[in-house]
Amino acid sequence: MKTKDLIPDEFFKQFKTGEGLNNFLKSIQKRGVEKMLEGELDAHLDYDKHSPKKKNNSRNEYGYGDY
């Protein structure tokens, strides 16, 4: 599939300046990187964020007995 087919030309008409388009692209890139990092952490810890924990809170390295 060509990238030209993914987003119609009408979509780009909403951007009146290059700065507006650049801000949009930066926000898309930021969201993409954040989601990739979340996925990497989920894979490393072997469970998704907000899912029931397998044993302790591995995301912040504290368990119930660690005070």
Image (tube, helix red, strand yellow):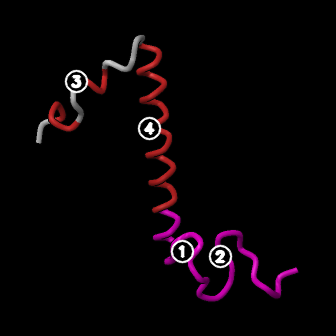
Q: Which residues are magenta?
A: 40-67
Residue under numbered circle 2: 58
Mark pair 2, 4: CA separation: 28 Å
Mark pair 3, 4: CA separation: 20 Å
Type of the residue with mark 2 = Ser
Which of pointers 1 and 4 lies earlier in the amino acid sequence?
Answer: 4
Type of the residue with mark 3 = Asp
Locate the C terminus and report the quarter of the image it occupies. Answer: bottom right
Type of the residue with mark 1 = Leu
Residue under numbered circle 4: 29
Type of the residue with mark 4 = Gln
Q: Please report the residue visible at 43 percent of the width from the left and 46 percent of the height from the top.
A: 32
Percent coordinates x, y for residue 7 in the rendering? 24, 33
CB contact under 8 Å: marks 3 and 4: no
Q: Is residue 63 magenta?
A: yes
Q: Is residue 5 left or right of residue 46?
A: left
Percent coordinates x, y for residue 56 in the rendering? 68, 84
Name the outermost residue toward the right: 67
Which of pointers 3 and 1 lies earlier in the amino acid sequence?
Answer: 3
Residue under numbered circle 3: 9
Mark pair 3, 2: CA separation: 46 Å
Mark pair 3, 1: CA separation: 41 Å
Q: Residues within 10 Å of mark 2 (few under 14, many from 20)?
A: few
Residue under numbered circle 1: 45
Residue 4 against residue 48 in the figure, above or below: above
